[in-house]
Image (spheres, coloured by chain):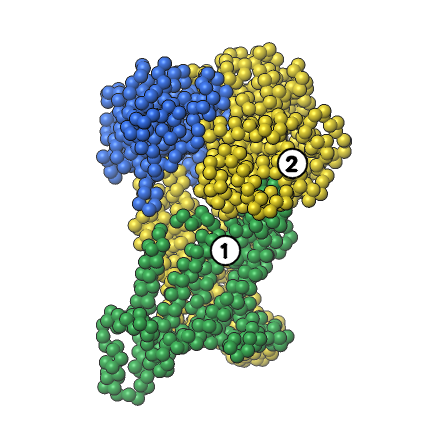
Chain colours: A yellow, B blue, C green
Amino acid sequence: MPRPPGRRDRPDRPDRPEHRGLLRRLGPAFWLAAGWLALVVAVAAAADLLPLPRYDETLAGPPRSGPSAEHPFGTDALGRDLLSRVAHGARVSLGVGVGAVLLGLAAGAPLGVLAGYRRRRTDAVIMGANDVALAFPAMVFALAVVAFAGASLVNVLAVLGVLSVPAWIRLVRGTTLVFAEREFVTAARALGARDRSVLWREIAPNVALPAASYAFVGMAVTIVAEGGLAFLGLSVQAPTPTWGGLINEGRPVMETAPHAVLLPSLVMFLTVLSANLVGDRLRALTDVRQSGLEPVRRRPAVPLPAPGQVHRIEEGALLQVAGLRTHLPTPRGTVRAVDGVSFTVRRGRTLAIVGESGSGKSMLIRSVLGLVPGPGALRGGRVYLDGRDLTGLSPERMRRVLGTRFGAVFQDPMTALNPVRRIGVQLAEPLRVHLGLGAKAARARGTELLASVGVPEPARVMRRYPHQLSGGMRQRVTIAMALSCGPDVLFADEPTTALDVTVQDQVLRLIRRQREERRMAVVLVSHDLAVVAEWADEVVVMYAGKVVERGPTAALFERTRMPYTEALLAAVPKLTDPAHHPLRLIAGRPPDLADPPAGCSFHPRCPYARERCAVEEPPLLPAETPGHLYACWYPRDTGARAPADTGSGTGTDSDGRGLDGPCGPGRPAAAGRPGDLSGPNDLSDLDEGADSRGR
Amino acid sequence: MAGSGTAHLRPAGEVVLRVEDLFVEFPAGRGRSVHAVSGVSFDVARGETLGIVGESGCGKSTTARALMQLPPPRRGSVRLDGVELTALRGEALRATRRRLQMIFQDPVSALNPRRRVRDIVAEGPRIWGTGADRVDEMLAAVGLDPATAAARRPHEFSGGQCQRVSIARALVLDPEVVICDEPVSALDVSVQAQILTLLERLKERYRLTLVFIAHDLAVVRNVSDRILVMYLGKTCELASGDALVERPAHPYTRALLASVPRGGLGLPPADRLISGEPPSPVTPPSGCRFRTRCPEAGPECAAVEPVMRRIGEDHWVACHRPEVR
Amino acid sequence: MTAVFRAVRLLVVLLVVTFLSYALLSLLPGDPVGQILGGAATPEAHERLRRELGLDDPLLVRYGSWLGGLLTGDFGTSYITGVPVLESLADRLPVTLELLAAAQLVALGVAVPAAVAAARRPGGPLDHALTAICFGLLSTPVFVLGVLLILVFAIKLKLLPATGWTPISLDLGWNLTSVLLPAVTIALPETAVYSRLLRTDLIATLQEDHITLARARGLSPRRILWRHALRPSAVSLVTAVGLNLGAMIGGAVIVETLFGLPGVGRFVVDSIFARDYLAVQGGVVLISVGYVLVNFAVDLAYAAVDPRIRRA
Ligand SMILES: Nc1ncnc2c1ncn2[C@@H]1O[C@H](COP(=O)(O)OP(=O)(O)OP(=O)(O)O)[C@@H](O)[C@H]1O
Ligand code: SF4
Ligand code: SF4
Ligand SMILES: [Mg+2]
C-alpha cells in the first residue's frame, strides 16, 4: 500500500503490543508470586522424594528445637521435622484449593453464563437458588458434612467447592451481563450466529480472564477456609499434617517454641498472598487499556522552561493567556496537551476554541483554571485576569478567584452534577462558601438563579436530584451554578455536545443572554464549526495542542489562511449542499502528542507541505485583518473564502483541483471525490488512524 | 409524527424493504411501558438511501433493531423482498440474516475486544460457509491493510478504524440492505468525512441499499435520497432531501432545521418555533405527540392523531396544519 | 422490584433454608436417641423414645410441627441438655452482636480515613503503602492473625487477656478489654477489603466531571473529598459491609474458639458435635433471619447513599 512519505508509524502502537505489554503490565510482583506458587506446588508434588525425615517420625530431632541446618523449620512438640510436615501439609492445602476452585468453576460458570445470557426466567430461577445458597449457613453445612461423612480430603474439597459455587455464579453472571449488552453480541446475532456460538465465541473469551483472575483469588479463599477447618479439627485428620492443623498444634507451645506457629503461618501467608497477587494482576489485565486506577510508574515530565518574561498586558483584555503549556507525564512519555497557547478575551465577547478530539481544548480550559490533572502535570506560561497574574497565587487565593470570578460548564450534564446531592444544596454551596450567605438567603438566591436561566418551577427543582431532570434542564442548572457568584469569565467546554439540536439552540441562546446581562466574557469550546461560526466573536483553532489560526470570526471563516482550518471547514457536510455532495477529506490522523512531528505539526497531512514545513515550525503571522493570525509557511490566499453558511466554498475544492496552492512532495491523494478513487486500496490513504488518546 | 399512517408507502414491487405500522414497547416498571416506536411505516427502494433523523430517544435505534428482529417488534410488519420477517422464528429467521446487516454507533462496543480483526470479519463466512475468500478484499475495500490489520485486536485501532472493521463485517456477506445506526456520531469531523465517503463508495461498488440513521440533519442530508423525520416514536415528514430542506412542512421539521446553527435557511429563529424538551415516551401526549411543543397546535391536534398525507411530489407529512409552500 | 415482592422473596428464602437444613440434619447418620440413652439401652427403649420424640414421623410432618412451634415462638428444647433452645440462643446472641458491632466499628473507623487519604494522591507513597498493607492483611487467615495478636498483646506484652469473656452487665471495662482483641482480629482483614474498595471507587469518582467542576467553583479539597466524593463512592462499601454482617450473624466460629467466647458460632458447632438437631436448627433460624434483615438494611443503606436507587 503506498503511503504518503510524510506519514510515520505511530510510536505508541508497537507491532506486537500484546507480548511486550503483557510482561510490563503484569509487573515483577506477579512473577515473584507466580514463582512462589510454582515452588509450593513442586514441593507438594515431590514431598515424598525430597531428602526429608518422614512427616510422622517422632523424635527426628530434639522436641521444640528452633530452626537448624538439620531441621530448617525446627521441630514440633513431638520432635517431628516441621519442614517435612509443612511440605506434606501443602498437599492438602493446594489439593483442596485447586480442587475446590475447579469444582466451583465447573458448576458455577455454566450457570452464571446461562443466567446472564438468557436472563428473564432462567436468571430468576438461578439467582433465587443462589439466594438460598447464600443465606444457608456455610459453617453448618461444612460442619455437618465433615462431622458426619468424615473429614477426608475429598469431602473437605467437595464442601469447600460447593460453598464457592454461589460466588462463581455471581461473578460469571455479572461479567456475562456486561458483555451480553454490548453491541458486538447483537452484531453476531445479526450475522446469524446461533446462541451456542455466540456464547462460545463472543462471550466466553471475555469472561475467561475475569474467571482466571477469580480462580486465584478463590484459591486463596479456599486455602484459608481449609486452614480454618483444620484449625477447628475438622479437616483431614491426623496423622496427615495440614497447615491449619500445624498452626493449631503449635499453639500450646507458642511461648517456648514460637517457630512452630510462625513458620507454618509464614508459608501459608506467602502462599495466600501470592494467589491474591496473581489474581489481582490478572484482573488488572481485563481492562484492555491500563485504567487510571492502577498506580503506574510514570516517567517524569521534562521540566518546562521557566516562564521568565513578563508579558505585555493587552489593552482592554479581561483575560489574557500567554504561552500556556501543560505537559502530562504518561507511560508513553510526556504528552504535550497544551503547547504554548496565547489568546485574550474582552468583556462582553465570546471567544471560541475549536479543534478535533484530542487537540487539547479541554486541557487548555482546565489549565487556565489551574485544574491540571494528576500530581506530575506541569504547567507553564501565564494567565492574567485584569492584568493580574494568576499562576503565582496560593491555592487559597486561587480558589477565591475560581469561586467568584470564573464560572465553568462542561460537556455532559449527566456527569456535571453530583448525583447524590440535591440541586438546592449544590446550588447554594458556592454562595455560602464564597459569599458567606446564610442557608435561607442562599436558597432564595439559588431559586432566583434557576428562574433566571429559564428553569420552570425553580422552587420544586431545588428539592430534586439531578437524575430527576432532563438533559437540557440539567445543563441549565449547571449554568446557574456557574453564574451563581457573578463570574467575569464563563468557560463553557462543549456545553451542548451532549444535547439535541433544538435544546442546543436554547442553551446557546441562554449563554448569550447571560453574557449580555452580566457583561461577562465567554470562552466557548466546541468541535462544531457551525456553532462557532454562529455564536462566537473570535475563534481560536487548535491542532495538536497549539494554536494554528486565530482571529475575528468573520475574517477567519471568510479568509481562512491555514490549510488545516480550511480542510476542516470543507469536511463538514452542509445542509445547503445537494445530496451526495462529495466531502473534502483530510488524510492521515492527528499526531501523537507524546511525539509530535517536527516543524509544522500538520505537515504529515497537509497537501501543501514543502520541505521547510517539516523542519521549521511556523510562527503565528498576521493576516490582513487586524487580529487575524495564522501559523503557516504557505498560507491559502484565496481572496474570498466562503463562510460556512453559504456553503459554496467547498464546491470548487472538492475535486482537489480547486486547491491551487503549491503541491508539496508529500501530497497524498487526499482531496479526491469518491468517484476518482479506482482501486480497492484507495481509501486506505484516507485512513485517519487512532487519535492520540488511543481510544 | 407526530403521526402514523401508511399512505406514503410505495407499491410492494418497487421496494426491497417495507416496514408497516411498527410498534415496539419496553416495560418501564409498575406495569407501565415505554412507547418507543408507535406505528412507524416506511419503505426503501433498491439502491436507495433512506435517511432517518430525529432527536435522541425518538426511537431511531429501536426501529433499526426491530428491522433486524433483535428483538422482533411487538406488532407490525417488516418485509424484505416480500418475505415477512416478523412471522419467521428460529432457523427460518436465521436464514434471512445475511441479507440484512447493521452498522452500529459505538465503534468500540461493536467489536469483540478479545478477537482479532480478521476473525471478526470472517465470522459471517464461518457461519454461512461462503465468502471466506472475500475477507481480505473487504478489509482492503474499507481501507485497512489486510496484511497488517487483520492480526490485531480492536483496541489497537482508533474509533474510525473500528468503524471500518464494522463496515467490513457487515458487507462481507454481501447483504441487500445495510442499516447504519448513527455510524458517524461518535467520530470527529475529519473522520466522519472519511467514513461517509467510504459508505458512498461502497454503496456504489456493491449496489447496496442503505437505511442511514443519524441525529445530524446535515449528515443525513448529505448521504440520503429520501429523509424520514421521526419524533417520539412517530413519523412526521417524508420527502426527498431537497424538498425537506427547501420546503419543510411539518412544524417539527421546521424547528429542527431552524435549530441547526448557520443553517442559513431563512426560517424564523428556532426559539419561536419550538420550546422545551420532548415529553416522556412512557406517557406520550394524546393525538399528535408533538402538540406539547408545537407553536401551531390547535384543538384538533389533541383529539385526533394526524396521518401521513401527500402534499407534493413524493412529499408526505403527518400534521393537521402543515406549512405547505 | 417492589418492596412487597422483595419481602416475599426473602420469606421464601427463609423457608427453603430452614427446610433444607432440617432435611440435611435428619438425613445424616447418627441420631439423638443414641446420645440421650447412652450405649447400654435396649433396642426397645430406643424405639419407645423415638416414637415419643416424634422422630418416626415423615420428614415433612416433623418439619411442619417444628415450624408450627417456631411461629408461636417455641424453638423446642434440646434433647441433650434439656435447656430451651431459645434460652441458649438468647444467652449467646449478645456476645456475637457485640463482637460484630465492635469489629465493624473498628474496620470502618480505620478503612474510611485510610481510603480517603490514599485516594488524594493515587500512586503516591501513602497509596502504595496502603495497597501493600491491604494485601498483607487480606492474605493473613484470621486464626493466624488471632494467634499473632495473642502472642504479642497477651503473652509478650501482657496488656490484654488472651481468652475469656466478661459480659457488659458485669463490668463494662473488662467487657471492653475482652472484646478488643477478637474484634480487631475480625476487623483487620475487613479493613483491608473496605479500604481497597473505597479507594478504588473514590479515585474513579474524583475523576468525574462534577468533582472537577466543584474544584472549578473554588471549593477546598477537604470539602470536596468528604462532602462531594465520599457518598457517591460508597455503594460497593455498603455491599461489602452487608455481606460481612450477613456472614457474621452466625458467629465467627474461629475467633470465638480462639478467644474462648460464648457466641452463637461456637454454640452451633458444639451442638452439631453433640448431634443436638433442635439447637442447630435454632442457630440456622437465627442466621437466616439475620441474613434477611441485613438484606433489608443494605437496601435501605443503598437508598440513603444513592438517591438514584430509590426509584427501584
Ligand atoms: N489525564 C490525562 N492524562 C494524560 N493525557 C491526557 C489526560 N487528559 C487528556 N490527555 C491528553 O491530552 C490531549 C488533549 O486532550 P483534551 O481532552 O484537552 O482534548 P480535547 O480537544 O478537549 O478533545 P475532545 O474534543 O475529545 O474533548 C490528548 O492527547 C489527550 O490524550
Ligand atoms: S503549508 Fe506547511 S506550514 Fe502550512 S500548514 Fe501545510 S505543512 Fe504547515
Ligand atoms: S399542528 Fe397539530 S398536528 Fe401539526 S405538528 Fe402541531 S400539534 Fe401536531
Ligand atoms: Mg474536550
Mark 2 highlights which residue?
A405
Q: Secondary structure at mark 1?
A: helix
Residue contact between numbered discs 2 and 1, judged by CB atoms under 8 Å:
no
The quadrant the N terminus of chain B occupies is: top left
Q: Quadrant of residue A577?
A: top left
Q: Give amino acid for label 2.
A: Arg
Nearer the viewer's eye, disc 2 or disc 1? 2
Q: Chain of mark 2?
A: A
Q: Look at mark 1 in the image and give the residue it sits on.
A: C237
Q: Residue at x 46, y 30 (%)?
A: A503
Image: C186 above or below A167: below
CA gap, disc 2 to disc 1? 38 Å
User: Is residue B17 at least partly visible in the picture?
Assistant: no
Q: Is A122 on the left or on the right of A264, as rendered?
A: left
Location of residue A51 with respect to C51 vertically, above or below: above
> In this orientation, which residue lies closer to the viewer: A20 or C207?
C207
Secondary structure state at the residue bearing disc 2: helix
